[in-house]
Amino acid sequence: MIEKSAETRLIAIASGKGGVGKTWLAITLAQALSRMGRRVLLFDGDLGLANVDVQLGLLAAHDLGAVIAGRVTLAQAVERHADGGFDVVAGQSGSGALSTLEPGELDRALVGLRRASSAYDCVLMDLGAGVESGVRRMAAAAGLLIVVATEEPTSLTDAYAVLKLHKADRPDGKACVVVNQATTQTAGERTYATLRQACVTFLRREPALAGVIRRDDRVRDAIRRQTPLLTRHPTCAAAADVEALAAWLADAGAA
Ligand SMILES: Nc1ncnc2c1ncn2[C@@H]1O[C@H](COP(=O)(O)OP(=O)(O)OP(=O)(O)O)[C@@H](O)[C@H]1O
Ligand SMILES: [Mg+2]
């Protein structure tokens, strides 16, 4: 097996538009990859409204704020989520302090993340909504960017904007698309085809379709109970779709 570099271990999850399911997907993907035997670190990179810990019901002793303030190292801020089978670095929710980070402070945290990543097969970074500079820096630092879109037109235009900015920030960067909350597999593929066409025409780039995740009421139930989906509803449609996405990433050599 080829030894991975620190960068290629980092997978960022972005969308532009808020509320499409990035955080839920990052958590469920972390769980699916861990069930495939991968050592996974889930990093809450939402600098504005971090909530990986909330969706997991995790009471983290330290968070990214403490790392940035220099009180602990990134490795010391890692918490184990035993049920999910992966490690977590929680974000700092509510204070808003991290949303005004200096680029240098964020870059130092990313250096720490790269260093910590050597203990893992892959590091998933859940990014915030929007396309502000922190989101762009983290997306550009990753070896692979997963752009999450839904069937809503506003989500598609925002996903396109993320891909366009990523091309400007990282002309050699790799990106792929996940359609979430799809009404059917076919509808999800149609949504991807629209986005792909815009990328081919205007960006001369063709991000692959990494997966379609169907809309599934079990997702909301699992989040409400602060339990990872594959624990609570292991055989539901969305669970099968995330497992297929994890297998796609493994086949692509990304995880
Ligand atoms: N496949 C799905 N099926 C049904 N509901 C879903 C699915 N994916 C996400 N959701 C719903 O979308 C909501 C938002 O999810 P989540 O918080 O993960 O989005 P987000 O993109 O991280 O939001 P933000 O941009 O605010 O960080 C969830 O609470 C859940 O109810
Ligand atoms: Mg989120």
Image (cartoon, rainbow, N blue to C red):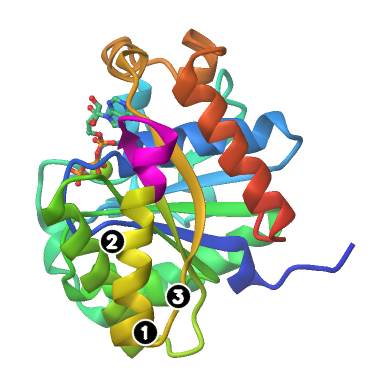
Image position of 24 with respect to 71: above or below? above
Horizontal placement of 177 versus 68: left or right? right
> Residue 114 location, x and y as percent?
56, 68
Residue beneath the point at 17% across and 64% down? 157
Q: Residues within 10 Å of mark 1 (few under 14, many from 20)?
A: some
Secondary structure at badge 1 equals helix
User: Is 171 above or below relative to 8?
Assistant: below
Spatial CA span between label 1 and label 2 = 31 Å
Look at the picture and state if 67 lies above or below 101.
above
Q: Nearer the viewer, mark 1 or mark 2?
A: 1
Disc number lying in front (3 or 1): 1
Query: In terms of image quarters, where does ligand 1 lie?
Result: top left
- The image position of residue 126, as x and y in percent, is 37, 50
Q: Which residue is mark 1?
A: 167
In the rendered structure, are the residues bearing label 3 and label 2 in contact, judged by CB atoms less than 8 Å apart? no
| Residue type of the residue flagged with mark 2 | Ala
Q: Which mark is residue 141?
A: 3
Ranked by sequence position, the earlier of labels 1 and 2 is 2
Residue count near mark 2 (Cα–Cα under 10 Å), binned few <14, some 14–19, many ≥20: few
User: What is the x, y in percent for residue 81?
Assistant: 53, 26
Cα distance in 3D space between marks 3 and 2? 21 Å
